[in-house]
Image (tube, grey):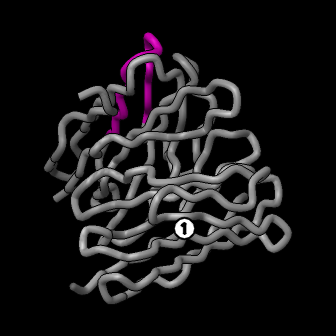
Amino acid sequence: GENVEQHPSTLSVQEGDSAVIKCTYSDSASNYFPWYKQELGKRPQLIIDIRSNVGEKKDQRIAVTLNKTAKHFSLHITETQPEDSAVYFCAAINNAGNMLTFGGGTRLMVKP
Amino acid sequence: DTGVSQNPRHKITKRGQNVTFRCDPISEHNRLYWYRQTLGQGPEFLTYFQNEAQLEKSRLLSDRFSAERPKGSFSTLEIQRTEQGDSAMYLCASSLVASGGNEQYFGPGTRLTVT
């Protein structure tokens, strides 16, 4: 089955700096890669996603890149703000298009 | 609120008791998923429905767990003879499977504590 590894597990940045979170996946048939933000005690919130036919996608301060050959994808947050502080999860969907496999999460702390 | 809703939000039960959780998906979403999340970990897939049909079950879903979606709308997840290891957040998600659609939207979860 699919295996998703996520790094780093914790990331502390100064407000205004950029943050990068990286994930690798094992199943070359996976074709959809969402990112979720989860604040303490709240639901995972879909913030951006990318499909395997695209190499990069951007939405305001967040962007995701995908390298299918290396089976890597990354989340980039620019001009970080304290409200970006949360746990971020990457995920990959299996080739049947139903089951999400999540990474272990990255706790991002943005210091004002 | 037109998002995914779950009830109850919290459940405390004694070991050996049965519990049932409910999930109401986003209206018109034909797929519904159950995940389990323990502290500090990402959600783990348990099972999913397309309309009323349960199409896949994880090996995490022991025979003490059963899920239903009788009319293709809301779903229930029942855990029989609860064990302390069942303590976790149980998350429901829904999606609309159309051309290329994979986005799964999560509910707030039901936090289960087994004492």
| Residue B74 belongs to the span the image colors magenta | yes
Find out whether residue B72 is within the magenta segment. yes
Q: Locate residue B45 relative to residue A50 in the image: left or right.
A: left
Query: Up-down: is A82 above or below B113?
Result: below
Residues in magenta, as a range: B66-80
Which residue corresponds to the image point at 58% horizontal and 52% vertical from the top-left?
Answer: A49
Q: Nearer the viewer, residue B45 or A70?
A: A70
* Outermost residue, right side: A69
* Amino acid type, callout 1: Gly
On the image, the x and y values in percent for residue A15 come to 30, 83
Where residue B109 appears, x then y in whole percent? 29, 45
| Above/below status of A81 relative to B68 | below
Q: Position of residue B22 (x, y in %)?
A: 29, 30
Secondary structure at badge 1 equals: loop
Circle 1 chain: A
Q: Is residue B108 left or right of residue A29?
A: left
On the image, numbered disc 1 is attached to which residue? A103
Q: Is residue A15 left or right of residue A104?
A: left
Q: Is residue B90 above or below residue B37?
A: above
Is A3 drawn above or below residue A111 in the view shown?
Answer: above
In the picture as drawn, the residue positioned furthest to the top comes out as: B71
Write the residue at 51% across / 56% down: A59
Identify which residue, A48 or A7, lies in the foreground: A48
Say which quadrant the N terminus of chain A sits in: bottom right
Quadrant where the C terminus of chain A lies?
bottom left
Q: Nearer the viewer, residue A103 or A110?
A: A110
Count of marks placed on residues: 1
Can you tell which quarter of the image residue B105 is in? Answer: top left
Q: Position of residue B115 (x, y in %)?
A: 16, 59
Q: Quadrant of residue A57?
A: bottom right
Q: Residues within 10 Å of mark 1 (few under 14, many from 20)?
A: many
Instruction: Looking at the picture, tell me which residue is in the foreground, B109 or A67.
Output: A67
